[in-house]
Image (cartoon, helix red, strand yellow):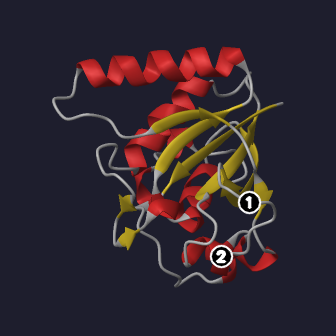
Amino acid sequence: MKKIVVAGGCFWGVEAYFRDVRGVLRTEVGYANGNKANPTYQEVCNGIANHAEATLIEYDENKVDLKTLFEHLFRVINPHSLNRQGNDIGVQYRTGIYYESNEDYEVAKRFLDEKQTHLERKITVELKPLTNYYRAEEYHQDYLIKNPNGYCHINLGLLKDDEKNEKN
């Protein structure tokens, strides 16, 4: 099992989307790459903590590779939007790929460089080592399962049937 942390705006939708991707074993939402230990949602929202709302993805590399996960990320984000996804605006809604190994950095760097060659506008997805990651409060975990009519900026219908986990 491997893991990667991504940010794509509000973490509720990012988690809901990736939870259903074939090869993903587990997801959780949290706060990544910010300025303080154990931030609360309120601190992130009011700017005391400058973490990104992020999703930790644990996956079976024999069923899905990292590049495919990045393709899914780009399917659900606007890679040119700085600190904004959908109607959500603020530093916590930035997009990012946060890695823990040099191997994952290399895959992500090649992916972003290749994507940029096909785009006129600059990609604003940050690529940084994972720091200060903290699991979000329990009520945020699987939020859209607990609150099926909850807000989501992501079109969860973008996931094709042959891309879904066997459990779906």
Taking the spot 65% from the left edge, 76% from the top edge, the residue there is 43
Q: How crowded is mark 1: few (under 14 residues within 10 Å), some or many (20 or more)?
A: some
Taking the spot 34% from the left edge, 52% from the top edge, the residue there is 82
Looking at the rendered structure, the kind of residue marked 1 is: Lys
Q: Residue reaching furthest left?
A: 120
**Residue 93 tag number:** none
The reply to whether residue 19 is visible in this rendering is no
> Mark 1 falls on what kind of element?
loop
Q: Position of residue 109 (x, y in %)?
A: 49, 19
Name the quadrant of the N terminus.
Answer: top right
Q: Are marks 2 and 1 in contact (CB under 8 Å)?
A: yes
Left or right of 113? Residue 13 is right
Q: 40 and 15: which one is in front?
A: 40
Q: Residues within 10 Å of mark 2 (few under 14, many from 20)?
A: some
Q: In this view, does 135 lie above or below 48?
A: above
Q: In which quarter of the image is residue 2?
A: top right
Q: Position of residue 155 (x, y in %)?
A: 40, 62
Q: In this view, does 1 lie above or below 151?
A: above
Q: Quadrant of residue 58?
A: top right
Q: 47 and 163: which one is in front?
A: 47
**Residue 43 tag number:** 2
Looking at the rendered structure, the kind of residue marked 2 is: Glu
**Residue 36 tag number:** 1
Q: Quadrant of residue 45?
A: bottom right
Q: Position of residue 52 (x, y in %)?
A: 58, 56
Q: 114 and 65: which one is in front?
A: 114
Name the quadrant of the C terminus.
Answer: bottom right
Q: Is residue 161 above or below residue 83?
A: above
How far apart marks 2 and 1 lie (CA) works out to 10 Å
Taking the spot 65% from the left edge, 48% from the top edge, the residue there is 33
> Mark 2 falls on what kind of element?
helix
